């Protein structure tokens, strides 16, 4: 049966062999999360430039635009993916604004700092995850089994892809550790902060002195700025584990309660500043209203985690029904402490499931962080079903089986480099910028003014703001206000059958300044802007820039 460690702090990398093993798996995980991007950079065709994104490129380009805002001196986030301008901005996305300032200070490309921050966040996430695992498992073999699951496991997407067009394993990045590390920096940084705070709370509650919570307070303050949605998860987990601890020890721990309240309060400046800024800025207020990320439906969720779910349910049963009745722990207090340490994992999982079921427009965000307790409980479930199992070939093969979707993600990312780059709407299928597009970006940087609105197709509309920091008419599903209407207008603009009076009205009403026209825009409908009489300002290869207003 599983024996958990004492709740007291210890040097969790004190075993040299275990330390080497952990470092090896961290390097493997980060290496797999880096390989496709290095491959893409090295494989760039002559005269083309790798965009730096392979999956979730649409959101990735918006992060670059926020970094560019910070690089150019701003402490406010402004909507740059929409033609409407004049907002006051808000103190939100400070994480990316700071990354942009760091890139400017070091005179390094934004995309390089983006990926370095992503890997640093991934390192922090894996280290905090293993620390949490060591609080639950004393057996090194079981620690390794759990950590392998955390590093690479996912669901049955590799199998469901035969019948489901886009399984969640390949796009719901916040639900899995590897995918979290793969797509952006703020997911792993925020998840690492969440794990760190919960772990520190577990350790500090034992001391019954709220003054020892200072590290958790600082981490909560940072979490509120990096990803404030996770404060809901944090508040739920800390509140429930305190109540369960009161029940276990039959008395309230008021110093601990004060410490937990201050942890929660420390995280509020970030979301309060965001709320204040978005309510003052009507543009950001409209953006918040349409920025919807609802939960996955139940069948999709079950497929998203596959066999991890039944194993985790067995693990929950072991914690709640078997562990509390164990007789191999001396003393009532020690037994309660031993049990509640594991109950943190079940509480974390339960709180997350409840949050996912709530009718919030952003409830899918609550998946972030669920992977760690799910993997720990799945490990507990496996060794409950097979108590004599160790960490032999069978267990290693099983963890690789759970990792097939993550490994498939790496293969898909590399394959995107070689598939036809002819998609007119999604930048994920356009990992390279042509020589003409790069030259057009440079021209726009040197010859246009802030606030001048650019009209182009959906792909370049998504790419340009992260490299030019000029507003585009349409460029993103959420950050372009009234995006569906504008996407339809973009299609209509480039349709050769559209009357010229429509284009003239759109240019006038939306105050469009420039048209960037390339092969994608031509294929959107066959319209030739040369026939409209607009001044041609730039032309190289297949890309032209026209003055509209």
Image: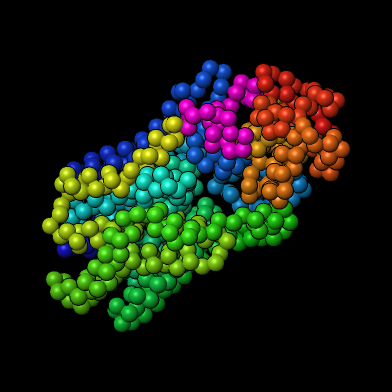
Q: Which residue is drawn at 36% across and 35% down?
A: 31
Is residue 109 shown in magenta?
no
Please, which colouring scheme is shown?
rainbow
Task: Tell whether 489 sits left or right of 67.
Answer: right
Do we see residue 178 in this rendering? no
Q: Where residue 149 sits in the image (x, y, percent)?
A: 30, 50
Q: Which residue is drawn at 62% across and 57% down?
A: 274
Seen from the viewer's position, the closer of residues 149 and 413 is 413
Could you say which quadrant of the image residue 368 lies in? bottom left
Numbered label tally = 0
Task: Tell whether 105 sits left or right of 198.
Answer: right
State which region is magenta. Answer: 416-441
272, above or below 325, in the image: above
Could you say which quadrant of the image residue 234 lies in? bottom left
Do we see residue 400 in this rendering? yes
Q: Where residue 253 sits in the image (x, y, percent)?
A: 36, 77
């Amino acid at each position: 049966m599983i024996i958990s460690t004492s709740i007291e702090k210890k040097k969790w990398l004190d075993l040299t062999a275990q330390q080497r093993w952990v470092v090896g798996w961290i390097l493997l995980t980060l290496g797999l999360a880096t390989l496709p991007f290095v491959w893409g950079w090295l494989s760039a065709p002559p005269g083309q430039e790798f965009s730096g994104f392979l999956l979730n490129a649409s959101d990735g380009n918006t992060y670059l635009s926020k970094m560019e805002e910070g690089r150019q001196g701003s402490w406010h986030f402004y909507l740059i993916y929409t033609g409407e301008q004049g907002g006051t901005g808000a103190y939100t996305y400070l994480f990316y604004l700071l990354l942009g300032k760091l890139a400017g200070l070091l005179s390094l490309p934004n995309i390089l700092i983006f990926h370095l921050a992503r890997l640093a966040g991934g390192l922090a996430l894996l280290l905090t995850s293993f620390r949490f695992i060591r609080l639950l498992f004393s057996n090194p073999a079981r620690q390794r089994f759990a950590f392998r699951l955390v590093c690479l496991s996912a669901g049955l997407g590799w199998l469901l892809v035969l019948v489901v067009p886009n399984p969640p394993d390949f796009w719901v990045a916040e639900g899995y550790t590897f995918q979290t590390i793969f797509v952006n920096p703020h997911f792993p940084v925020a998840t690492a902060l969440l794990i760190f705070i919960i772990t520190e709370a577990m350790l500090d509650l034992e001391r019954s002195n709220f003054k020892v919570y200072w590290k958790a307070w600082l981490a909560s303050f940072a979490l509120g700025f990096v990803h404030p949605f996770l404060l809901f998860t944090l508040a739920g987990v800390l509140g429930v584990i305190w109540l369960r601890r009161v029940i276990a020890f039959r008395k309230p721990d008021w110093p601990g309660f004060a410490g937990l309240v201050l942890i929660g309060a420390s995280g509020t400046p970030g979301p309060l500043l965001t709320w204040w800024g978005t309510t003052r800025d009507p543009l950001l207020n409209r953006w918040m209203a349409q920025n919807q990320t609802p939960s996955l439906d139940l069948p999709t969720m079950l497929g998203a985690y596959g066999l991890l779910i039944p194993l985790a349910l067995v693990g929950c049963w072991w914690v709640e029904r078997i562990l509390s009745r164990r007789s191999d722990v001396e003393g009532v207090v020690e037994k309660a402490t031993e049990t509640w340490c594991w109950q943190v994992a079940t509480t974390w999982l339960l709180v997350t499931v409840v949050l996912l079921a709530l009718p919030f427009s952003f409830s899918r965000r609550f998946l972030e962080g669920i992977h760690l307790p799910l993997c720990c409980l799945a490990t507990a479930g496996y060794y409950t079903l097979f108590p004599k199992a160790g960490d032999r070939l069978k267990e290693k093969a099983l963890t690789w089986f759970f990792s097939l979707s993550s490994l498939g993600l790496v293969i898909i990312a590399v394959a995107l480099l070689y598939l036809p780059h002819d998609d007119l709407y999604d930048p994920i299928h356009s990992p390279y910028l042509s020589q003409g597009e790069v030259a057009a970006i440079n021209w726009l940087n040197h010859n246009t003014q802030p606030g001048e609105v650019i009209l182009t197709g959906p792909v370049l509309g998504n790419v340009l703001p992260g490299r030019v920091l000029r507003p585009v008419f349409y460029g993103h599903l959420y950050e372009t206000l009234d995006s569906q209407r504008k996407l339809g207008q973009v299609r209509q603009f480039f349709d050769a059958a559209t009357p010229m009076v429509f284009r003239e009205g759109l240019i006038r009403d939306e105050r469009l300044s420039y048209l960037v026209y390339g092969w994608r825009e031509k294929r959107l409908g066959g319209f030739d802007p040369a026939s409209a009489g607009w001044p041609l300002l730039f032309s190289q290869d297949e890309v032209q820039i026209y003055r509209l207003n």
